[in-house]
Amino acid sequence: KAAIARRWKDKGRGKPGAAQSLLNENIKTLVRQSMLHLVLAGKTAINDYYGQTTTSRSSNSNDPQTIAYIITSPNEFLTNQQQCIIELLQDRTLQTNASSVISKIARMDLPLKWHSLIPTLVEGVQVTRGILVQMKQHQQQPQQQSPQQYQIFQTILYNTIYTLEGVLSEISTQRLLVDKKYRNAIAVQYLGSIIEYGMMPSFHDLEELFMTSHNGSNVGQQEKEDGIMKVLQIAILTSRIVSYMMISSFSKLVEEEESSSSSSLVEKVLTLMHSFLSQWLPRCVLGGGQVNNTTSSSSALVGKSKSSLRELVHIHCEIIVNVQKSHSVAFARYLTPFLNLFHSSLMCIVGVTENGKPTTINSGGLQLCSNDPFAISFLSFLANVVGSSSKYIEMDGVKTELAAFFTPLRVQSLSRVLLQLFSFYIVPPSKDEANEQVNNTNDHDDDFEGNNDFVQWQDDPEAFYLWETHRCSDEDVGSAAQNLFLALVESSSPPLSCCSKVTLSFLANLLGNVVSQRLAVEIECGISTGLPCEIVSSALPLGPPAANLWHGAKNVEIDLILQWDAMFLAAGLIGGISLEGYGPGGGGGGGRGLDFRTLFEQSLGSCLALMLQSQQRQRATHLPVLERRIIWVLSCNAHKVPISSQYNPLGMLSSALLSASDICIRLTAVQAMDALLPFCEDVPSLLQSTIEHTASAIYQLVNECSEVESRSACLDLLTNLICVQLRGSLTTAVLNTIVAPLSSIWENAIDQNLLLRRNVLGILSCVASFVGPESCTILYPLALPMIDDSFAREENVFLVEEALKIWYVFLRLSKTYDPLLGKLFVRCAELSKDLEHVMILMRITEYYIILGGANFLNDHATTIQTTICNIIGEVRPRGTAYMFLVIEALLRSFPAEGGSMLQSCGVLKKMVESCASNYFEHDKCEPDRVIVLYLAALARASLAMPGLLQSLLPLTTSSGAVFGEEELVHLYLMKWKVAGNGAHGLLFQKLWALLLLSFYPPCQLASCCNTVLAKSNTIFNIFVYVIKNTNRDGTNVLSYEVGYGEEEETVDTGAEIYEAMLQEQRTKDIVISTLLQEAVSTKMSGLPHELGQKYQEFLSTIGNDTLQQLEEVTRVI
């Protein structure tokens, strides 16, 4: 298996020319043949154990690479070799490995090679099943008369089906179109054979064996159990094969039948499954109870056979669930029978009648488990049907059937059942487990001592909170019930338009029962104790619980608490859906009904206040079930919570965080406070009070929690509290309380808790933004080492992005350059190698240049050079735009020094090379928007260093073309219009105009001078355009900047300081401060002297209109 996984396909590994035997097709053919022969016949070598009459065949004559040997008769075995064959066929380790090898090869070969594999395996199933049927027909008791031969062929059948299931399992995960088409072809061609020779006979054998075991026989118990297990194993594997084919190709199967006049295979398969489930579901669901007044034969099952039967039945349930989910439209015509079956089975498994009333007895002593696979399948199927109902809007027959099934009475009954399934308490573990837990507990209520969730909450409240947060509908009955409930609530269009109205009205009426709600709260708080059962029972909003959901000795007080827990859970689930118009006074007819604000003011607020005020509470459950749930409901309905209510919801959450002893309650309060914060910005005084009272409590909770997810949530809340409070004020004592523990958290954050360092950086960033420029330097001794540590250690690599952000925040808050802050910049050289951080790294470097000026440049010139060299030419145009922020800041403030720096490190040479490549239109040349930036940088450097271009030009490209001064001038003129794009376009155009003007005599660059003189008509028009469009004070010449992109987090901190520094830089910018008309006037006035007799000839090359316009704007000519 290992060799095949690595060497079956040529992946370019190994030394060139080295022999790789598995890449040889002859070797591959031998491997395929040997493995397949081992599965089908019990030997890898041909004819070793068989006589000359052995039949050899290839299932596909056009695919000669693998010859399959299928035994067609018991007579083909040589008597003296039977034992060896049996040992090979029954060696499960050997056969499992052979099947695994075939599956791995199939994944890499199919559908392009080994086309005969699946046909051969299917043929093996057909032939072997035929032999077994013949043996049973000729011998009444084959197991006794010829047990060895019968066992051989039964084993061959199992091995063949096991291998086929493994192959289909492997190829079912491949997603290429060619793989999907191949799976469709396999399903269309072979599903019928698998049903006829695999599934149907296995169902028949299963029923026959159960009837035999029920009626009694002379067969020993162990032999009977072995026989049942063999049949069950074959049935399970066959069902999985059908599952792969149906789930991947159901729509294709239906399409093929619609296009042909053949009988409906799909209908036959689904009818068979429905019949099987109708027969066996009650036996599995009722666990050996009464079925049609007869004792279920599943009572004869024990141990593995009982578990295998449940697995088999569940596989068929999942086939229906997944086929409907994946092919909802194609499955629509077959929907109703399974809808009825699964709905009735769900009611049976819960222990209620069709109209939602509890059954009089618990069905067969059954208790529903929270991870019951059948209940999850039934709930998932119903949720998928309801959720996909909009797809049936043009299917009149299906619409009629669904409308007939989902009647208002049935929807309300189903809603009632779902609410009962919501509760975290569903069923205790087995009696043995319950007794063990009772022995390990002393003070818990008898009815709750066997409760898994209760024990988990009590023993580890944090783990329970996280489990509740991550509950999955595929593994948990309560979560699956929540999905179905939400599907009903959201189904407001035909054919299920009544579902939403009925469900919401039902829930609103229940939530409006304030008296029952208050009683449940008082019982939990220990205020109301010892009440008569009749009084508490009459207050149950959902009525008596379903028969199979009772927990040991009935306790109506617990039932009341759990039912309200379920209804509050429902209120939280529908947080985005309004209940207005439903419930008391509404009825779904447009009246006011019940809205969440009213619910909070009338009941939830007072109930939560009562719970928080009760001291030394003695709850009946020993757990604050309703307190936690009400707090959770606030988080789900945060946008509807009246922040300014008399009950002060934020204050109550703070109180829960401060006074509750239960970690689960406090973590839920953290969750709710975090949800409420965005709606508290208009009450800064309330926020200030909240931070002052809860900061230390949050850190205490962080210390008590052990899981990084919980601790991170607490620190996130503290971060968000500070961010929302930016407009308010905090005392120095509170700020010290917030900042003091951060160093300890950072140092102790190891292993999984390393993630908390991100939270520490986030808090520091928010605190720095809060205290502002005047005080942020106080944080330097704490924050800067943490930022540096984030870059220095490999274990902190995940912190780099966060550290860069807080670094930038501290920079933006700095009004003066601090050497402590400057020391961090040495990290830029290494960080710039990771191009992922180019955007923020370039903003940081730009800010350093502006802030630090000459002092910074003297200290870090080499780092700047290294950083730019690592980036130029290695990033996309967007990245180059960010890089130019640094170059612009450098050349704007220090044009000569900056130009010299860029020249000495080769940056300017790279720019010229890119310009030359673009000019000659080479392949993969930089686009115009990048060339414009490079030309702007060259222009600034050349204006400050007139002889610079002589050291860079001419340049010979890789194609042999020469790019000189003349070509450079032409390039400036070619890209003139492109340079004008964007807000800073006028800045670039004026810069280029100044450069072109500098090329007029007197000029050191003869070629440039001659070129501009020849192109003066165009260049003078450029001068006219720039002068006309530029205000005399230069206010409309905007500085170069790059807006924040979608992938970049906007940083608003220190925006005013940044703008002030940019304005100061503008005053030093030669491009903005220079009056172009004066510069043109000065240069033009000297041309007659410079050109002498050629001046008139020069003027003749310029159009009269151009000269006239230039004279008007300069008042010279």
Image: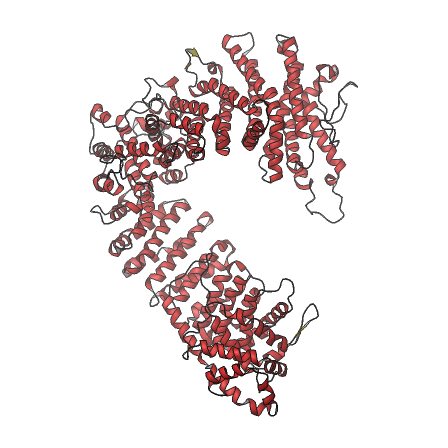
What residue is at 28 percent from the left and 61 percent from the top? 732
**Hey, which quadrant is residue 528 in on the image?**
top left
Residue most extreme to the front: 1104
Relative vertical location of residue 144 with respect to residue 662 in this rendering, above or below: above
Q: Position of residue 618 (x, y in %)?
A: 24, 34
In this orientation, does residue 478 appear?
A: yes
Residue most extreme to the right: 52
What residue is at 54 percent from the left and 60 percent from the top? 835
Query: Toward the viewer: 959 or 602?
Result: 959
What kind of colouring is applied to the model shown? secondary structure
Relative vertical location of residue 973 with respect to residue 1097 in this rendering, above or below: above
Query: Toward the viewer: 212 or 1071?
Result: 1071
Q: Position of residue 101 (x, y in %)?
A: 66, 33
Q: Position of residue 162 (x, y in %)?
A: 61, 26
Relative vertical location of residue 685 with respect to residue 1096 in this rendering, above or below: above
Question: Left or right: 782 with respect to 796?
Answer: left
Query: Toward the viewer: 289 or 620?
Result: 289
Relative vertical location of residue 223 with respect to residue 1056 in this rendering, above or below: above
In this orientation, does residue 615 appear?
A: no
Say which quadrant the N terminus sits in: top right
How many numbered discs, if any? 0
